[in-house]
Image (spheres, grey):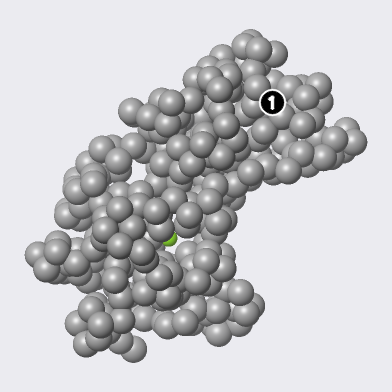
Amino acid sequence: METFTQYFCRCGKEKFDAVLFDIDGTLSSGGRPLPGAKEILTMLEKEKFPYVLLTNDSCNSHEEKAAILQRGDIPVFKERIYSCGDVLKLWKKDTNYQGELLFQCGKLGTPSYADLSGLRVTTNPAELPLCHGVIFGEGSYDWQPALEGIFNFFLARPDAPMVVVNPDSYWPSCTHSGMGIGSGAQARFVCAVLKDAGIIVEPLYIGKPYPFIYRGIMAELETLLGKKVLPERIAMVGDSLASDIKGANANGLCSCLVLSGITTPELAEKAAAESKPQMIFSAV
Ligand SMILES: [Mg+2]
């Protein structure tokens, strides 16, 4: 089976205007580069071919994420990263935000994506009654006071916004060798308890595979390329059917699955129509 790099060298420049890469399971695994990752990033950089690393990691700022990847010998510049955290800017614009206080559980990078988006946040659960809505961040934090506070907040304010920056349920933990429970799962847990209490809250998810992040990256690419961008001329290369491939398909991008991460050939074969990759590669 061909790698994405082999395909790209054969016809990628004619077919695509830019390439989006997922990071974990696509370019890196356990902090180390996956086969071909260094080569394709170096090649695209040298040839000045537009590419962006599109990540659901909102726990690390661009600077932190680039530093983590560079420590793992993966040549990445912070300017090449676009995170679901960046999309908070779009949310702010869409909701006509007027500076209201928001409760943030967990982290959103240093510098914080919330600050960079001009959002006023508190991480103190005692201030929840003063808040207009809730943003789910990520990483290690004291879950009980935060989640119970959020539960009580929505019992009183069921129509308030619940924004979930990273919709993922789980991922390889950065603090131990197993899997970590993601912010998407934490939000769904709170929503399930609210449902038991007769309150229906629909979170707004903004990372992959939801449309918000694709609106954000398409606008970013148009700025980068200085022209109107056709989604079918953008390759989305990733290892997750549920996140990378489903999101690419739903937004008209060319979905390219790599089998270097969480998806086996059998799973790819059995994928539902909305998660079927247009192309499959052994690795980047
Ligand atoms: Mg991945």
Q: Position of residue 43 (x, y in %)?
A: 14, 69
Q: Position of residue 120 (x, y in %)?
A: 50, 20
Residue 169 appears anywhere in the view: yes
- The answer to whether residue 92 is above or below residue 30 is above
In the rendered view, tell whether residue 241 sits above or below residue 114. below
Query: Does 84 sit left or right of 66 as displayed?
Result: right
Residue extending farthest to the left is: 46
Looking at the rendered structure, the kind of residue marked 1 is Ile
Quadrant of residue 59 within the rendered picture: top left
- In the image: residue 180, left or right of residue 232: right
Q: Position of residue 67 (x, y in %)?
A: 22, 41
Tell me: 2 left or right of 264. Answer: left
Question: Which residue is under mark 1?
Answer: 150
Q: Quadrant of the C terminus?
A: bottom left
Residues 117 and 226: in front is 226
Position of 269 with respect to 233 (left or right) is right
Q: Is residue 145 above or below residue 180?
A: above
**Residue occupying the point 30% across, 53% down:** 223
Which of the two residues, 71 or 198, is positioned nearer the viewer here?
198
* Front one among 218 and 245: 218
Which residue is rendered at x = 23% and y = 44% of the image? 78
- Answer with the quarter of the image where residue 258 lies: bottom left
Return the x and y of residue 256 as percentages of the image width and height.
41, 75
User: Measuring 34% from the left and 29% from the top, which residue is drawn there?
Assistant: 110
Quarter of the image with the N terminus in it: bottom left
Q: Is residue 175 visible?
A: no
